[in-house]
Image (spheres, helix red, strand yellow):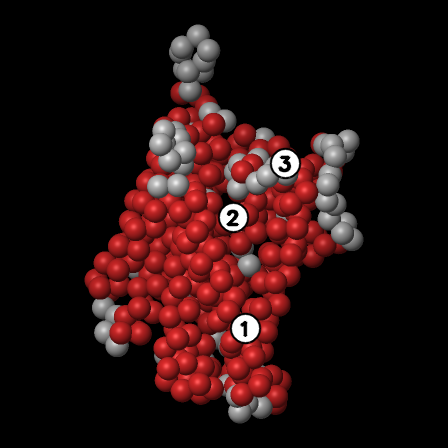
Amino acid sequence: MAELSTLLPRAGGVYVFLREAYGDAAAFVFGWLYVLVTTPTAVASLATVFAEFLLNLLGIPAGVTTVQLIAIAAIIILTFANVLGAQVGAAVSEVTTLVKVTALEAIILGAFLLGHGNLSHLTEGGAVQGGGLARAVAAVIWTYDGWIAVSMIAGEVVAPERLMKRIIIVGMLIIVTLYIGANLAYLYMMPVSVMAQQKEAIARTVMTAIAGPAGGVLIMLAIMTSVFGALNGNLLAKPRVAYAMARDGLTFSFLGRIHPRWSTPWAALLIQGVVGIIMVLVLRDFDTLTTYFVVVEWAALIFAVGAVFVLRRKMAEAPRPFRTPVYPWVPLFFLLGTVIGLSAIVWGQIQVGNFSPIYGLGIAAAGFPVYHLWKRFQPTPGGSPR
């Protein structure tokens, strides 16, 4: 993705890559999914789990209505914060990122320096049910999709040809190191069989064992801050897809409106906030929300990474400040791993009766006829539909 972001450093990210590689129809369908499925559902998922963690911390039963009310309030607050300006949203992200990194470092160092764990836990196995495997794979895949959001604001980065490769590569290396370290710390402190029975956040259990109840509360606050920051990041970056579509004439023009005072894509932000609230009310369950959008989003990203191959041919002479190392094996490995992961999610969810990923893929497929209808009824330069 660093290669594509430096080759085409424009607002919209993956949408831009798909348009250049496959044409307007593919770009429209990706934008269609981002407006109707992936961004609102990601927002709803994060808001829902934030509400559940808050109620858990306060010792209040997590009733469906209470969770929904808190989740909706979080969406409204952050939507308007981002309407007020990118600087506001960026400031929130900076603070929450600092808290998250500090918390992960505390877990890793605390477990291995102060914890009374056992290295034998790292090699213990256990039976995994299809539904559990699906949720685990969905969570892992979602964890690493921050690079998507980064690519969407490439058009607003100073000297993107030089900086985007550093942002994506260094950022991903830090994330991978911290997350793998944290998971090793969890396994060191707690065998998988015990972890599977936990009713609260694993990080809170681990920090409580290391530093007592106060440590557990502090790490829970850090987790909530991290979730709040991720929610803010989605609202900050992803509406740029709808904005880019409107700019290119592939969706309603009002989605491309910039607020005259705060210079933000306010219409796209408000609409995606509203759809996110609808998702909170309709899908309700965090696992259903997660598997619903992860499958759809990463199915689209298969084609986005495939754009590396297409654009190597279509734009062979274009300058590439960064070239994918060990090409073509690195993108091929990504594509293979993603297909296997998505297949595991879909199969596992079907086994437990959750067909939401199938519905999401159906909405994705519906985007192609919608695109052709859109183009048919768009006025020609003379003023009449095509």
Amino acid at the residue labelled 3? Leu
Amino acid at the residue labelled 1? Glu
Is residue 15 visible in this depiction of the protein?
A: no
Is residue 116 visible in this depiction of the protein?
A: yes
Q: Position of residue 64 (x, y in %)?
A: 24, 64
Q: Nearer the viewer, residue 301 or 134?
A: 301
Name the residue that disc number 3 marks.
8
Dot 1 falls on a residue whose secondary structure is helix
| Image position of 93 with respect to 306: above or below | below
Camera-nearest label, 1 or 3: 1
Dot 3 falls on a residue whose secondary structure is loop
Quadrant location of the C terminus in the rendered image: top left
Q: Position of residue 89 (x, y in %)?
A: 41, 48
Looking at marks 3 and 2 on the same chain, the residue that comes earlier in the sequence is marked by 3
Q: Residue visible at 28% across and 70% down?
A: 55
Q: Quadrant of residue 306?
A: top right
Name the residue that disc number 2 marks.
149
User: Residues at badges 1 and 2 in contact (C-beta under 8 Å)?
Assistant: no
Q: Nearer the viewer, residue 355 or 342?
A: 342
Counting other residues with Cα less than 10 Å from the Cα at mark 1, is it few (<14), some (14-19), or many (20 or more)? some
